[in-house]
Image (tube, grey):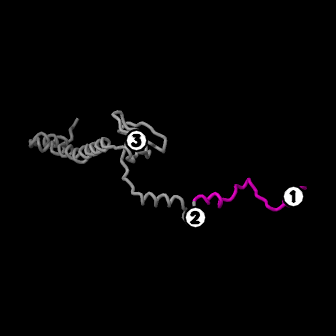
Amino acid sequence: MERCPVQGHMFILAAGSKGNPLVTFLPLIVIVGAFYFFLIRPQRNRQRQQQQMQKNLDPGTRVVTTSGMYATVVEVNDDGVILEIVPGVQAQFVAQAIMRVLPEETEDADEDAHEDTEDDAHGTPADDVEAKTPPPPSIVKSDDKTDNTDKG
């Protein structure tokens, strides 16, 4: 069997090049450094901020859980936190379930938001929607005394 001359030359070139081993590992070192600075370090900072936020929870703070539930902190224990989901409904969560703290709203912003929910786009109260809605097709309102159906 004959050997390909190109393969033999490649082997000779690879065996003959004796460079600095640091240059050989330099791309690997750069990749590891990039992973550290772009992935690992920012993730550690986010974890520290999350832990700090969870340690600084106070009763009355509005929060969002990792499952997307909006609640108010009622009590902070060693085991976790007790959250009030709606008035009168409380649930116990581990502190790690708190994803973020909501910014506090002023009373003026809260009143404006409440007014917006009462009125629809035309400026009429939302309670009048039921009065404006036509009855379903199965219910027929008839004010006249005559029956318009054919009986035979």
- Report the front residue among 6 and 53: 53
Task: Say which of marks 3 and 1 sits in front.
Answer: 3
Where's the C terminus, which quadrant? bottom right
Q: Which residue is mark 3?
A: 74
Q: Which residues are magenta?
A: 126-152
Q: Which quarter of the picture shows residue 71?
A: top left
Q: Nearer the viewer, residue 122 or 28?
A: 122
Residue reaching furthest top? Answer: 79
Q: CB of mark 3 within 8 Å of CB of mark 1?
A: no
Is residue 71 shown left or right of residue 47?
right
- Magenta highlight: main SS: loop
Q: Residues within 10 Å of mark 1 (few under 14, many from 20)?
A: few
Front residue (pair 63, 76): 76
Q: How many marks?
A: 3
Judged by depth in the image, the label closer to the viewer, 3 or 2, is 3
Name the kind of residue labelled 1 in the image.
Asp
Element type where label 2 sits in the image:
loop
Residue at 25% x, 45% y: name it.
45
Label 3, residues with CA under 10 Å away: few <14, some 14-19, many ≥20? some
The residue that disc 1 covers is 150
Residue identifier under label 2: 124
Q: Residue at x 13, y 43 (%)?
A: 13
Which label sits on residue 122? none
